[in-house]
Image (cartoon, rainbow, N blue to C red):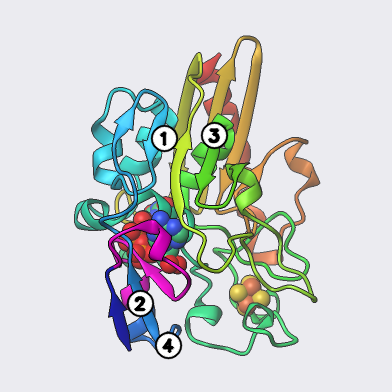
Amino acid sequence: MELLQPSSLAEVEGGLLIAGGTEVVPQLRDGLLDPTTLVDVSALVPRGIDGGRIGAGATLAELEVDPQVPDALREACRLAASPQLRNMGTLAGNLLQDTRCWYWRLKFPCRLHGGDRCHAREGEHREHAIFANGFCASAHPSDVAAALVALGATLRTTRRELPVRELYRLPTEDDRRTTTLEPGEVLLEVDVPAPDASVYLKAMDRKRWSFPLVGVAAVRRGGETTVALAGAAPVPWLLDGPLDEATPLPGTAYKVELAGALVARARAAVA
Ligand SMILES: Cc1cc2nc3c(=O)[nH]c(=O)nc-3n(C[C@H](O)[C@H](O)[C@H](O)COP(=O)(O)OP(=O)(O)OC[C@H]3O[C@@H](n4cnc5c(N)ncnc54)[C@H](O)[C@@H]3O)c2cc1C
Ligand code: SF4
Protein backbone atom coordinates (compact mmCIF):
# COMPACT_ATOMS: atom_id res chain seq x y z
CA MET A 1 0.00 0.00 0.00
CA GLU A 2 1.28 3.44 -0.97
CA LEU A 3 0.82 6.53 1.27
CA LEU A 4 0.51 9.86 -0.56
CA GLN A 5 0.79 13.26 1.12
CA PRO A 6 -0.22 15.67 -1.66
CA SER A 7 0.75 19.32 -1.31
CA SER A 8 -2.53 20.66 -2.71
CA LEU A 9 -6.16 19.58 -3.04
CA ALA A 10 -5.83 19.73 -6.84
CA GLU A 11 -3.53 16.70 -6.61
CA VAL A 12 -6.17 14.57 -4.84
CA GLU A 13 -7.61 12.34 -7.56
CA GLY A 14 -8.72 9.19 -5.81
CA GLY A 15 -7.46 6.60 -3.35
CA LEU A 16 -8.65 6.21 0.22
CA LEU A 17 -8.55 9.50 2.10
CA ILE A 18 -7.32 9.56 5.67
CA ALA A 19 -7.46 12.40 8.22
CA GLY A 20 -7.29 11.46 11.94
CA GLY A 21 -7.31 7.76 11.03
CA THR A 22 -9.50 6.67 13.95
CA GLU A 23 -11.94 4.95 11.59
CA VAL A 24 -9.65 4.12 8.67
CA VAL A 25 -6.83 2.49 10.66
CA PRO A 26 -9.02 -0.05 12.54
CA GLN A 27 -10.69 -0.96 9.23
CA LEU A 28 -7.29 -1.48 7.56
CA ARG A 29 -6.26 -3.66 10.49
CA ASP A 30 -9.46 -5.71 10.27
CA GLY A 31 -9.24 -6.15 6.50
CA LEU A 32 -12.45 -4.20 5.83
CA LEU A 33 -10.42 -1.78 3.72
CA ASP A 34 -7.60 -2.82 1.42
CA PRO A 35 -6.66 0.22 -0.69
CA THR A 36 -3.65 0.41 -2.99
CA THR A 37 -3.30 4.13 -2.19
CA LEU A 38 -3.91 6.00 1.05
CA VAL A 39 -4.11 9.78 0.67
CA ASP A 40 -3.39 11.85 3.79
CA VAL A 41 -5.50 15.02 3.55
CA SER A 42 -4.98 16.19 7.14
CA ALA A 43 -2.73 19.12 6.11
CA LEU A 44 -5.03 20.23 3.27
CA VAL A 45 -8.53 20.37 4.77
CA PRO A 46 -9.41 23.65 6.55
CA ARG A 47 -9.77 23.29 10.33
CA GLY A 48 -10.53 26.81 11.55
CA ILE A 49 -13.79 27.89 13.21
CA ASP A 50 -15.07 31.32 12.18
CA GLY A 51 -18.58 32.01 13.44
CA GLY A 52 -20.82 29.41 11.79
CA ARG A 53 -18.15 28.39 9.27
CA ILE A 54 -16.31 25.30 10.47
CA GLY A 55 -13.41 23.60 8.71
CA ALA A 56 -14.08 19.90 8.09
CA GLY A 57 -10.59 19.18 9.44
CA ALA A 58 -11.46 20.57 12.89
CA THR A 59 -11.26 17.88 15.55
CA LEU A 60 -14.21 17.01 17.77
CA ALA A 61 -12.09 18.16 20.73
CA GLU A 62 -11.71 21.61 19.15
CA LEU A 63 -15.44 21.85 18.45
CA GLU A 64 -16.63 20.79 21.90
CA VAL A 65 -14.94 23.77 23.62
CA ASP A 66 -15.49 26.57 21.10
CA PRO A 67 -18.19 29.04 22.22
CA GLN A 68 -18.94 29.98 18.57
CA VAL A 69 -20.27 26.46 17.99
CA PRO A 70 -24.02 26.00 18.68
CA ASP A 71 -24.85 24.00 21.81
CA ALA A 72 -26.28 20.99 19.94
CA LEU A 73 -23.09 20.49 17.94
CA ARG A 74 -20.75 21.13 20.87
CA GLU A 75 -22.64 18.67 23.04
CA ALA A 76 -22.80 16.05 20.25
CA CYS A 77 -19.01 16.27 19.99
CA ARG A 78 -18.46 16.21 23.76
CA LEU A 79 -20.60 13.08 24.15
CA ALA A 80 -18.91 11.20 21.28
CA ALA A 81 -16.17 8.59 21.65
CA SER A 82 -13.35 9.22 24.18
CA PRO A 83 -11.04 12.23 24.78
CA GLN A 84 -8.19 10.52 22.89
CA LEU A 85 -10.42 9.76 19.90
CA ARG A 86 -11.87 13.28 19.90
CA ASN A 87 -8.34 14.71 19.85
CA MET A 88 -7.60 12.82 16.62
CA GLY A 89 -11.03 12.46 15.00
CA THR A 90 -12.12 15.17 12.57
CA LEU A 91 -15.54 16.50 11.67
CA ALA A 92 -15.26 15.12 8.10
CA GLY A 93 -14.15 11.69 9.30
CA ASN A 94 -17.00 11.60 11.79
CA LEU A 95 -19.60 12.36 9.11
CA LEU A 96 -18.16 9.62 6.90
CA GLN A 97 -17.70 6.86 9.47
CA ASP A 98 -19.19 3.49 8.55
CA THR A 99 -21.87 1.57 10.37
CA ARG A 100 -21.06 -0.13 13.67
CA CYS A 101 -23.36 -3.05 12.75
CA TRP A 102 -21.43 -6.02 14.16
CA TYR A 103 -22.33 -8.28 11.21
CA TRP A 104 -20.89 -5.70 8.80
CA ARG A 105 -17.79 -5.19 10.97
CA LEU A 106 -17.29 -8.98 11.15
CA LYS A 107 -17.56 -9.20 7.33
CA PHE A 108 -20.76 -11.23 7.17
CA PRO A 109 -21.85 -11.24 3.49
CA CYS A 110 -24.83 -9.02 4.31
CA ARG A 111 -26.70 -6.63 2.02
CA LEU A 112 -24.41 -3.69 2.82
CA HIS A 113 -21.48 -5.86 1.76
CA GLY A 114 -23.32 -6.74 -1.49
CA GLY A 115 -25.03 -9.94 -0.29
CA ASP A 116 -28.70 -10.86 -0.24
CA ARG A 117 -29.52 -11.02 3.49
CA CYS A 118 -29.70 -8.62 6.40
CA HIS A 119 -28.27 -10.79 9.17
CA ALA A 120 -29.26 -8.24 11.81
CA ARG A 121 -32.96 -8.33 10.96
CA GLU A 122 -32.98 -12.08 11.61
CA GLY A 123 -30.33 -12.08 14.33
CA GLU A 124 -29.01 -9.84 17.12
CA HIS A 125 -30.19 -6.29 16.58
CA ARG A 126 -30.72 -4.46 19.86
CA GLU A 127 -28.59 -1.50 18.66
CA HIS A 128 -30.21 -1.29 15.24
CA ALA A 129 -32.66 0.98 13.45
CA ILE A 130 -36.28 1.89 14.09
CA PHE A 131 -36.85 3.81 10.84
CA ALA A 132 -36.15 2.89 7.19
CA ASN A 133 -34.84 -0.52 8.26
CA GLY A 134 -36.43 -2.76 5.60
CA PHE A 135 -33.36 -3.31 3.41
CA CYS A 136 -30.57 -2.68 5.91
CA ALA A 137 -31.34 -2.21 9.61
CA SER A 138 -28.09 -0.47 10.55
CA ALA A 139 -28.29 2.56 12.85
CA HIS A 140 -26.26 5.63 11.90
CA PRO A 141 -23.60 6.08 14.60
CA SER A 142 -22.76 9.78 14.22
CA ASP A 143 -23.94 12.15 16.96
CA VAL A 144 -22.35 15.00 15.01
CA ALA A 145 -24.26 14.29 11.79
CA ALA A 146 -27.61 14.32 13.61
CA ALA A 147 -26.74 17.68 15.19
CA LEU A 148 -25.72 19.17 11.82
CA VAL A 149 -28.87 17.85 10.12
CA ALA A 150 -31.09 19.42 12.80
CA LEU A 151 -29.10 22.65 12.54
CA GLY A 152 -29.75 22.76 8.77
CA ALA A 153 -26.01 22.97 8.04
CA THR A 154 -24.61 23.19 4.52
CA LEU A 155 -21.55 21.26 3.42
CA ARG A 156 -18.92 22.52 0.96
CA THR A 157 -16.76 19.96 -0.83
CA THR A 158 -14.22 20.16 -3.66
CA ARG A 159 -17.13 19.45 -6.06
CA ARG A 160 -20.37 20.98 -4.70
CA GLU A 161 -22.40 22.60 -1.95
CA LEU A 162 -25.20 20.60 -0.38
CA PRO A 163 -27.28 20.34 2.79
CA VAL A 164 -25.53 17.93 5.18
CA ARG A 165 -28.55 15.62 5.04
CA GLU A 166 -27.97 15.13 1.29
CA LEU A 167 -24.55 13.65 2.02
CA TYR A 168 -26.51 10.54 3.01
CA ARG A 169 -28.66 8.06 1.11
CA LEU A 170 -30.53 4.92 2.11
CA PRO A 171 -28.93 1.81 0.61
CA THR A 172 -30.98 -0.07 -2.00
CA GLU A 173 -30.72 -3.29 -4.00
CA ASP A 174 -29.14 -1.35 -6.90
CA ASP A 175 -26.80 0.86 -4.90
CA ARG A 176 -25.53 -0.24 -1.49
CA ARG A 177 -23.79 3.02 -0.59
CA THR A 178 -24.97 5.05 2.41
CA THR A 179 -23.42 8.34 1.26
CA THR A 180 -23.44 10.34 -1.94
CA LEU A 181 -19.69 11.08 -1.74
CA GLU A 182 -17.95 10.74 -5.09
CA PRO A 183 -14.49 9.17 -5.55
CA GLY A 184 -11.85 11.83 -4.90
CA GLU A 185 -14.37 14.30 -3.44
CA VAL A 186 -13.04 16.04 -0.34
CA LEU A 187 -15.19 17.60 2.41
CA LEU A 188 -13.92 21.11 3.11
CA GLU A 189 -16.22 22.94 5.51
CA VAL A 190 -19.71 23.24 6.95
CA ASP A 191 -21.75 26.38 7.29
CA VAL A 192 -24.01 26.33 10.35
CA PRO A 193 -26.74 28.98 10.55
CA ALA A 194 -27.09 30.29 14.11
CA PRO A 195 -30.11 28.88 15.98
CA ASP A 196 -32.13 30.67 18.67
CA ALA A 197 -31.66 27.60 20.88
CA SER A 198 -30.34 24.06 20.42
CA VAL A 199 -29.62 20.95 22.44
CA TYR A 200 -28.28 17.40 21.99
CA LEU A 201 -29.36 14.56 24.27
CA LYS A 202 -27.99 11.03 24.06
CA ALA A 203 -28.97 7.66 25.51
CA MET A 204 -26.07 5.20 25.67
CA ASP A 205 -25.09 1.96 27.34
CA ARG A 206 -22.40 3.70 29.43
CA LYS A 207 -22.17 7.33 30.52
CA ARG A 208 -19.05 7.83 28.39
CA TRP A 209 -17.37 6.34 25.31
CA SER A 210 -20.41 4.73 23.81
CA PHE A 211 -22.21 5.07 20.50
CA PRO A 212 -25.76 6.48 20.61
CA LEU A 213 -28.56 4.03 21.26
CA VAL A 214 -30.60 7.10 20.43
CA GLY A 215 -29.30 10.66 20.03
CA VAL A 216 -31.70 13.58 19.73
CA ALA A 217 -30.76 17.01 18.36
CA ALA A 218 -33.40 19.75 18.67
CA VAL A 219 -32.96 23.18 17.13
CA ARG A 220 -35.35 26.12 17.47
CA ARG A 221 -35.51 29.13 15.18
CA GLY A 222 -38.37 31.46 16.03
CA GLY A 223 -41.40 29.30 16.73
CA GLU A 224 -40.18 26.33 14.69
CA THR A 225 -38.27 23.38 16.12
CA THR A 226 -36.37 20.83 14.01
CA VAL A 227 -35.46 17.43 15.45
CA ALA A 228 -32.99 14.87 14.08
CA LEU A 229 -32.01 11.47 15.47
CA ALA A 230 -28.79 9.45 15.62
CA GLY A 231 -28.87 5.68 16.13
CA ALA A 232 -32.35 5.44 14.64
CA ALA A 233 -31.98 4.74 10.88
CA PRO A 234 -29.21 3.79 8.42
CA VAL A 235 -28.70 7.54 7.91
CA PRO A 236 -29.03 10.55 10.26
CA TRP A 237 -32.80 10.83 10.58
CA LEU A 238 -34.75 14.07 10.26
CA LEU A 239 -37.85 13.50 12.37
CA ASP A 240 -40.55 15.12 10.27
CA GLY A 241 -43.47 12.96 11.44
CA PRO A 242 -44.66 11.32 14.66
CA LEU A 243 -42.51 8.68 16.35
CA ASP A 244 -45.31 6.15 16.02
CA GLU A 245 -44.44 5.95 12.32
CA ALA A 246 -41.34 4.00 13.46
CA THR A 247 -41.04 0.37 12.31
CA PRO A 248 -38.93 -1.17 15.11
CA LEU A 249 -37.64 -4.73 15.03
CA PRO A 250 -38.55 -6.94 18.00
CA GLY A 251 -35.26 -6.05 19.72
CA THR A 252 -35.41 -2.31 19.05
CA ALA A 253 -38.92 -1.47 20.26
CA TYR A 254 -37.36 -0.03 23.44
CA LYS A 255 -35.66 2.61 21.26
CA VAL A 256 -39.01 4.11 20.29
CA GLU A 257 -39.79 4.69 23.97
CA LEU A 258 -36.30 6.09 24.57
CA ALA A 259 -36.61 8.42 21.59
CA GLY A 260 -40.06 9.57 22.75
CA ALA A 261 -38.73 10.56 26.17
CA LEU A 262 -35.62 12.28 24.76
CA VAL A 263 -37.53 14.15 22.04
CA ALA A 264 -40.00 15.50 24.62
CA ARG A 265 -37.12 16.57 26.88
CA ALA A 266 -35.19 18.14 24.01
CA ARG A 267 -38.22 20.07 22.74
CA ALA A 268 -38.85 21.39 26.25
CA ALA A 269 -35.20 22.42 26.60
CA VAL A 270 -35.26 24.65 23.49
CA ALA A 271 -38.82 25.98 23.95
C1 LIG B 1 -14.20 3.37 19.86
C2 LIG B 1 -14.87 4.46 19.09
C3 LIG B 1 -15.97 5.10 19.65
C4 LIG B 1 -16.62 6.12 18.94
N1 LIG B 1 -17.73 6.71 19.48
C5 LIG B 1 -18.41 7.63 18.75
C6 LIG B 1 -19.63 8.20 19.24
O1 LIG B 1 -20.08 7.90 20.35
N2 LIG B 1 -20.26 9.12 18.48
C7 LIG B 1 -19.79 9.50 17.25
O2 LIG B 1 -20.40 10.36 16.59
N3 LIG B 1 -18.65 8.97 16.76
C8 LIG B 1 -17.97 8.06 17.48
N4 LIG B 1 -16.82 7.51 16.96
C9 LIG B 1 -16.38 7.90 15.63
C10 LIG B 1 -15.25 8.92 15.67
O3 LIG B 1 -15.76 10.18 16.04
C11 LIG B 1 -14.68 8.92 14.25
O4 LIG B 1 -13.91 7.72 14.15
C12 LIG B 1 -13.80 10.10 13.93
O5 LIG B 1 -14.45 11.33 14.07
C13 LIG B 1 -13.34 9.94 12.49
O6 LIG B 1 -12.52 11.03 12.14
P1 LIG B 1 -11.05 10.75 11.53
O7 LIG B 1 -10.51 12.08 11.16
O8 LIG B 1 -10.23 9.91 12.45
O9 LIG B 1 -11.47 9.91 10.26
P2 LIG B 1 -10.59 8.93 9.36
O10 LIG B 1 -10.49 7.60 10.02
O11 LIG B 1 -9.34 9.57 8.94
O12 LIG B 1 -11.58 8.82 8.09
C14 LIG B 1 -12.90 8.31 8.23
C15 LIG B 1 -13.60 8.36 6.87
O13 LIG B 1 -13.71 9.69 6.41
C16 LIG B 1 -13.05 9.87 5.15
N5 LIG B 1 -12.51 11.23 5.20
C17 LIG B 1 -11.78 11.81 6.20
N6 LIG B 1 -11.60 13.11 5.94
C18 LIG B 1 -12.21 13.37 4.76
C19 LIG B 1 -12.43 14.56 3.98
N7 LIG B 1 -11.98 15.77 4.37
N8 LIG B 1 -13.13 14.47 2.82
C20 LIG B 1 -13.63 13.26 2.40
N9 LIG B 1 -13.46 12.12 3.10
C21 LIG B 1 -12.78 12.18 4.27
C22 LIG B 1 -12.04 8.74 5.08
O14 LIG B 1 -11.74 8.40 3.75
C23 LIG B 1 -12.82 7.62 5.77
O15 LIG B 1 -13.75 7.05 4.89
C24 LIG B 1 -16.12 6.52 17.67
C25 LIG B 1 -15.00 5.89 17.12
C26 LIG B 1 -14.38 4.87 17.81
C27 LIG B 1 -13.17 4.21 17.20
S1 SF4 C 1 -28.09 -4.07 9.30
FE1 SF4 C 1 -27.16 -3.53 7.31
S2 SF4 C 1 -24.98 -3.69 7.78
FE2 SF4 C 1 -26.05 -4.88 9.37
S3 SF4 C 1 -26.30 -6.98 8.63
FE3 SF4 C 1 -28.10 -5.88 7.96
S4 SF4 C 1 -27.55 -5.23 5.87
FE4 SF4 C 1 -25.65 -5.67 6.92
Residue named by callout 4? 34
Q: Which quadrant of the figure contains the C terminus?
A: top right
Q: Is residue 125 magenta?
A: no
Amino acid on which disc 1 is placed: Leu
Amino acid on which disc 4 is placed: Asp
Tell me the distance, in whole angstroms, between the alpha carbons under discs 2 and 3. 29 Å
Q: Are dots 2 and 3 in contact, CB under 8 Å?
A: no
State left or right for residue 46 relative to residue 130.
Answer: left
Residue named by callout 3? 153
Residue named by callout 2? 38
The residue closer to the viewer here, 24 or 109, is 24
**Rendering coords of residue 218 (x, y %):** 55, 29
Q: Mark 3 packing: few (<14 Cα in 10 Å), some, or many (20+)?
A: many
Residue named by callout 1? 73
**Which badge, 4 or 1, comes first in the chain's sequence?**
4
State left or right for residue 67 relative to residue 125.
Answer: left
**Rendering coords of residue 117 (x, y %):** 73, 84
Range covered by the magenta-colored residues: 6-26
Q: Residue sitting at 71 percent across and 67 percent down? A: 171
